[in-house]
Image (cartoon, coloured by chain):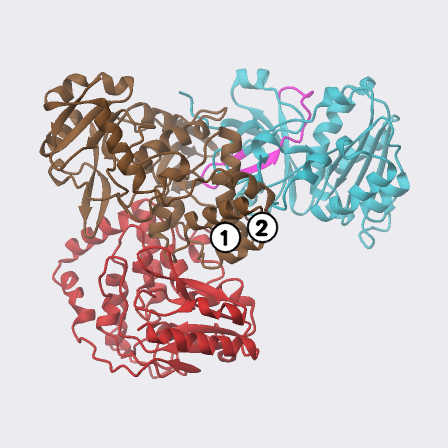
Chain colours: A cyan, B brown, C red
Amino acid sequence: MENIYKPYLVRIEEKRTETYDTTSFKLVFLDDHMRENFSFHAGNFGEYSVFGEGESTFCIASAPTKKGYIECCFRAAGRLTRSLAAKEVGDIIGFRGPYGNRFPIEDFYGKNMVFIAGGIALPPVRSVIWNVLDLRDKFEEVTIVYGARSVADLVYKNELRVWEEMGDVNLVQTVDPGGETPDWKGQIGFVPNVLKEAAPKAENSIAVLCGPPVMIRFTLPVLRELGFRDEDVWTTLENRMKCGLGKCGRCNVGHVYVCKEGPVFTAAQVAQMPNDF
Amino acid sequence: MPHMTLDRTDLPSLAQELAGQGKRLVLPVREGQELFYREGADPAQLDLSTIPKNSIKEFLFPKCEKILEYEYTGNDVVIEDVATDARPTVIFCARPCDAASLPVVEPLWNWDYKDKFFNERREQTLLVTYACRTAPDEACFCVSLGLSPSSDEGSDVMLYPIDESTVAVRLASPKGQELEGVFAKFKKGEIAEEALDGFAKEGEQSLAHRKRLDKVKDWLEEHFEDPLWEDKAFRCIGCGTCTFLCPTCHCFDIQDESVFDGGSRLKNWDGCQFSLFTLHTSGHNPRDTQSKRYRQRILHKYAIYPEKFGKVLCTGCGRCVAHCPVNLSLYDVVATAQERAEKGE
Amino acid sequence: MADRTDGIREIARKWLTDGTVEAVVGWEQGTYKGKGAPVLIRKAEDADRLLFNERCTNNLMTYLKRDPVSKMEKVGIVAKGCDIKSLIGLLQESQVEREKVKVLAVTCTGVEKDDGTVPVKCQACDVNTPTFYDEIVGEKVASNPDPEARSKDLERLDAMTPAERYRFWREELDKCIRCYACRQACPLCICSRCIAEKNQPQWVETSPHPRGNFSWNLIRAYHLAGRCVECEACETACPVNIPLMLLNRAMARTVKGAFDYEAGKDPEIQPPLRTFNLDDDNSFIL
């Protein structure tokens, strides 16, 4: 019987320091077969190992349309993420996955996509963004509203530039009041307010929303005011996970095991959940 | 169909015979004032006077087990799979509530992903269950879960102590039936099937005071926020006694431990009653009070698990009630929920 | 000792009615083998749930560190003499303010564990009639401690060679399942994050293997040295029957020999391993 706890080995091919505490990696499977055949869906996550330190849970931040590698982006906050942040290009770490459910991208074909993310929550949304941009003609308008506490906290800054320059993407960047630098050309304001001003249309639209709980709490009402139904607002829930396999008993929110039946949920599903997260 | 009977005094020899050469033999023995299931115990010390303090869980899901090995050479790392240390095992004279825990947890260990460690051990385990003539401890409540002191759920062979000197045998599974020859070596006589009915009734009667808990799931789902939780959970000190003694609790932690360049990844028992169990690295804890953690325990066992797998994550063995350092009785909590449900509260 | 029950109820009722305390922590009738079970009484009309008898074995002082009691401004606690010793320990270490805790002491003739045995602490008790309290209930009970009680089982350890002692503790501590019932039941294990819960760095391995168990149990014994009042909450709580008190009593004996100090007696003086004086005796070190 196979060992479900055994990770794949991946090598760090690229490392980018996104912010003072956030790092992103591009990871390539050591095994040729895995490298060629590994596939996943936007919304899936993995368990990333530093052998000797442990494992940590992050989404796969790259899009499933990109073959041959996966990417992740994480903040160095605890034992594992700190040791991961100290790894260099060429180092080998472990990856278990893909786990969890997915964004039903096919159900979004033909619709307008509104992406809203805050701070370190851009990576899970980014997976969907690139999935959509790689299949651009299947979707209508694409709006991205992304904000962080300050300019220094924005992640994937290089990609923000790429999206800005795309003619068929409406990118709105913002930082919290006081977080701007003198040469900041984006908006200044909290994401919910900036979203309200940007006022993307709700008709035939899907919203993908990820951010810290306080941002979600204030953004959902804005989306509802704009006319979005809770069934059309998609988000990912983070919870303390360990095995990713539905067995260690840690991640449930009421009846829902975030690692098996999530982490992707609609706002309507989240509204049904007990106050257990 | 009649069942064979054996002499009670032959039980140790039977155990020895089943274990044969080299099988791991687990049986209940006395240590001080209490009984424990112990691996490699001397069959002559077999003690059936009451329910052991530990469950048989540790023989299929050990408190600490290696799941991976790794070694660094420079920046390169090599990982090695670990073979399950499963070997043919005889658990001799488990109680029905322990045996019944195996079919309960089996779907969890196989929910989409199959845990080889549990499965390989289970496959190599022969479970011989000693039925309780009457409930062995005042904390027992197996009947509340639809089981009984002579339930054969999960068992390969049943032994019924029908009187002071006689034990009836029922080969309850194909694995058990294969061993007919071994048991026949100790055959004393026979007993009619109907006699076992009387035995079973006596056992159930001893627990007639225990409530059926059929309304608990619905009540729990409707009372997530209820003062009951804070009230009942006050006395909980947040240890892992109930969780670790419970035959069906299965939560675990994964830890890496290194010595210089190499080490192992381990799977260790963990529990939802610990304050750090659901703590996020950010500092946020969805279950930051003991009442929330205790609610999770009850909900998981009596609402969430049945919803997912069709079985309550409890066999009413009563260990949590008997050994909780502060006498927080899980039975009391769910019986209260049942009462409230019956009253429409 | 059931006669204390009425007195406790009366005082609890009074304290809750006149606002002396927000709540009273005491015992009520439990549901297993006649034991008492800890209860939090917030309303005067519930005071009749409180009782006291020889099956009230828990040390309720452990609730001082836990929510909701930790957040209360004034709380009443029903306490036996041994429990009060642990409160004295907490006061020595400034872990709780004296004004916060109203001690409802009971005179006690000893408790009985689930198996009917009488704990060593009761055989050795010198606080049957507590002297540190806000109110006291029960007739005076003279103390008649058995001078051998605490040292009796240490003789078993003393008779072992170091190798035998190591094997003894290996066998006992191998049983540990890291449930932390010992720590949670102990009123003096008060760290908001226990050393075993820290992972940067991982000071104590969390795994219940022999090495991890040795680390945990020995570190805990060290952290309690000079502080443990031998209330036996840990050993009573331990679900795998490790003789924790052997370890704790051995440490207490060493502290007594080195510093002539016994824990839980005087709230004004510091435990020796928590403080130093320039004229401390160093003869046994140097």
Q: Quadrant of residue C112?
A: bottom left
Residue B307, horizontal then vertical, whole percent: 53, 32
Tell whether label 2 touches label 1 (CB within 8 Å): yes
Name the residue at 63% across, 34% down. Answer: A263
Q: What amino acid is at disc 1?
A: Ser
Residue C133 visible in this rendered orientation of the protein: no
Chain ID for label 1? B
Magenta segment boundaries in residue numbering: A48-68
Name the residue at 39% across, 48% down. Answer: B242
Q: Residues within 10 Å of mark 1 (few under 14, many from 20)?
A: some
Q: Quadrant of residue A212?
A: top right
Residue B106, horizontal then vertical, whole percent: 41, 28
Q: Earlier in the sequence, mark 1 or mark 2?
A: 1
Residue B72 visible in this rendered orientation of the protein: yes
In 3D space, how far apart are the residues under numbered discs 1 and 2 (Cα atoms)? 9 Å
Is C29 above or below relative to C239? Answer: below
Q: Residues within 10 Å of mark 2 (few under 14, many from 20)?
A: some
Chain ID for label 2? B
| Secondary structure state at the residue bearing disc 1 | loop
Residue B56, horizontal then vertical, whole percent: 30, 37
Name the residue at 83% across, 39% down. Answer: A224
- Considering depth in this image, is C112 or C177 the residue closer to the camera? C112
- Considering depth in this image, is C182 or B222 the residue closer to the camera? B222
Q: Which mark is residue C58?
A: none
Q: Which mark is residue B285?
A: 2
Q: Which residue is mark 1?
A: B275
Is B165 above or below relative to C240? Answer: above
Residue A59 within the magenta-colored segment of the rendering: yes
Residue A273, horizontal then vertical, whole percent: 65, 40
| Secondary structure state at the residue bearing disc 2 | loop
